[in-house]
């Protein structure tokens, strides 16, 4: 039997759906649905956690709906599956909390907060997510560095931004931060940027970077 998870956003696990299924997560690129029986020989369901599927995609792949797969689909595609027998449809009604780069940054600077595993995974697993954090954090670090020897009006003009709450946060941090550690963090930024330019994206490098800057900057 095949399961369809109808969801607005891709989900990484099935815990919130309370399904009594034994499954393993499989990336879309790791399966050939035309040869699914040759790829796997156990009784676990295969949960494709990194991509949406459509009826046409499965039809073109000559997929056998009696196979033990769990696919994620968008609500707009659900109607096309209505004539398929032996199909279980589950609606994901849980709303995943949106994650922002400043969620990680706030934890980095706070010694009383541990790195959230879900946040760490989210902002290091995919290159696009990490770069959104990295760009935000890099600007935050250089704002701090510039404020060491310049007044806020000058820095705001250099960075072409408003002098708002960010500068109040920066002022509070500079009263506590060891300026040497700030220089070390900037050096870590340069080293990682160089690695990302010279080679393909590496999740472990990103995780190590986040952990390393927290060790240096938490106050």
Image (cartoon, rainbow, N blue to C red):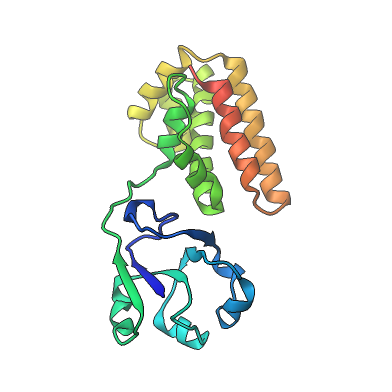
In the image, 135 versus 3, the foreground residue is 3
Q: Residue at x 73, y 50 (%)?
A: 198
Left or right of 31? Residue 16 is left
In the image, 97 versus 72, the foreground residue is 72
**Residue located farthest toward the right when viewing the structure as drawn:** 198
Residue 166, percent from left and from top: 38, 29
Residue 7, percent from left and from top: 33, 64
**Residue located farthest toward the left when viewing the structure as drawn:** 93
Residue 70, percent from left and from top: 44, 68
All told, the count of numbered labels is: 0
Q: Residue at x 64, y 43 (%)?
A: 204
Q: Residue at x 65, y 32 (%)?
A: 188
Residue 200, percent from left and from top: 68, 54
Q: Quadrant of the N terminus?
A: bottom left
**Residue located farthest toward the front when viewing the structure as drawn:** 43
Residue 82 higher or lower than 109, as above or below: below
Q: Quadrant of residue 90?
A: bottom left
In the image, 30 versus 87, the foreground residue is 87
């Amino acid at each position: 039997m095949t399961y369809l998870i109808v969801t607005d956003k891709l989900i990484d696990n099935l815990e919130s759906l309370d399904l009594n299924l034994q499954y393993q997560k499989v990336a879309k690129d790791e399966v050939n649905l035309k040869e699914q029986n040759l790829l796997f020989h156990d009784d676990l369901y295969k949960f494709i956690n990194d991509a949406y599927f459509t009826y046409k995609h499965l039809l073109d792949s000559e997929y056998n709906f009696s196979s033990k797969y769990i696919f994620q689909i968008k609500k707009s595609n659900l109607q096309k599956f209505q004539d398929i027998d032996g199909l279980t449809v589950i609606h994901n009604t849980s709303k995943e909390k949106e994650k922002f780069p400043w969620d990680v940054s706030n934890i980095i600077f706070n010694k009383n907060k541990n790195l959230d595993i879900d946040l760490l995974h989210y902002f290091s697993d995919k290159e696009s997510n990490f770069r959104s954090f990295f760009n935000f954090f890099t600007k935050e670090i250089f704002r701090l560095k510039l404020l060491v020897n310049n007044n806020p009006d000058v820095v705001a003009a250099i960075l072409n931004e408003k002098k708002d709450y960010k500068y109040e946060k920066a002022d509070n941090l500079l009263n506590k931060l060891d300026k040497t550690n700030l220089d070390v963090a900037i050096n870590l930024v340069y080293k990682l940027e160089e690695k990302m330019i010279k080679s393909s994206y590496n999740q472990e490098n990103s995780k190590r970077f986040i952990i390393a800057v927290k060790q240096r900057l938490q106050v």
